């Protein structure tokens, strides 16, 4: 708590991306349009060349492209996330090293574009997830914000939003219908987690 203004200190969020970064953009935009937002985005990092890096820089956020194939990638990731209170995976496609998950245990969030535990797990990302929903004949899908643990997509679920599957949907239609709900879900899930962290003290 600042002695001068009495304002609560903001939590430092570092966002990891691999692609477009629309979820990342939603997290940044919320913090830049809500003065009482309890977090600030300290930095954006990608594991490969990602359009979201330019988007982050255009919004005034430090952004750095790393290379997941480099032998010291995990060490670089640990170095560059120094000072983070919470790590947000927003369309991040690499599997995190166990030592990274241990370092930020209980403080890593991920957004997945289905109603976990349905259609999650290793290799389930992007259009493959939505195609699996269509192949299953389910009439609803959605998105999930969950804590990241060593087991892919199996951490504690913080928030889900349901989205209808419509007759004749192709995977891309479902993806496009769910994406805006992901943006809301990720921001709301992050706020929920920060409230929990504050309660824990
Ligand atoms: C989103 O659908 C997210 O759920 C999945 O990959 C996509 C990333 O989109 N992990 P963006 O890069 O946030 O626009």
Image (cartoon, helix red, strand yellow):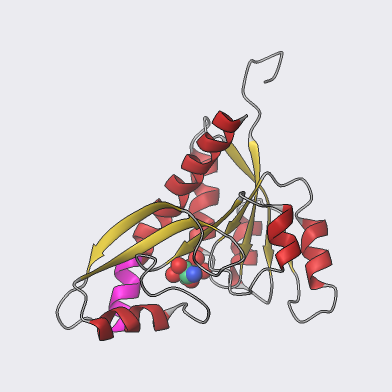
Residue 174 painted magenta = yes
Q: Position of residue 109 (x, y in %)?
A: 55, 55
Which residue extends farthest left?
167
The quadrant of the image that shows the C terminus is top right
Q: How many marks?
A: 0
Image coords of residue 197 (percent x, y) = 58, 36
Q: Main secondary structure of the magenta part?
A: helix
The residue lying at 54 percent from left, 70 percent from top is 152
Q: Nearer the viewer, residue 64 or 191?
A: 191
- Residues drawn in magenta: 170-178
* Quadrant position of residue 11: top right
Q: Residue at x 40, y 60 (%)?
A: 144
Up the image or down, 171 lies above or below 55; here it is below
Image quarter of the N terminus: top right
Q: Is residue 128 above or below residue 89?
A: below
- Please check the rendered image and state whether residue 36 is part of the magenta-colored stretch, yes or no: no
Q: Position of residue 67 (x, y in %)?
A: 76, 76
**Residue found at x 33% / y 82%:** 132
Task: Report which quarter residue 31 is drawn in.
Answer: top right
């Amino acid at each position: 708590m600042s002695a001068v203004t009495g304002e609560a200190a903001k939590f430092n969020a570092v966002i990891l991306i691999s692609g477009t970064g629309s979820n990342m953009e939603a997290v940044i935009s919320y913090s830049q349009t809500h003065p009482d937002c309890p977090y600030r985005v300290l930095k954006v990092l990608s594991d490969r060349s990602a359009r979201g890096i330019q988007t982050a820089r255009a919004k005034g956020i430090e952004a750095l492209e790393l290379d997941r194939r480099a032998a010291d990638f995990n060490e670089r990731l640990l170095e560059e996330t120094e000072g983070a209170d919470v790590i947000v995976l927003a369309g991040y496609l690499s599997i995190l090293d166990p030592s990274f998950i241990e370092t930020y245990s209980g403080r890593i969030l991920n957004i997945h574009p289905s109603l976990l535990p349905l259609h999650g797990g290793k290799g389930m990302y992007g259009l493959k997830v939505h195609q699996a929903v269509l192949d299953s004949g389910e009439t609803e899908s959605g998105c999930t914000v969950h804590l990241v643990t060593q087991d892919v997509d199996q951490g504690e679920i913080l928030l889900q939003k349901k989205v209808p599957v419509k007759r004749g949907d192709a995977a891309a239609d479902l993806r496009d219908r769910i994406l805006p709900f992901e943006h809301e879900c990720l921001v709301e899930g992050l706020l929920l987690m920060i409230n929990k962290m504050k309660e824990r003290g």
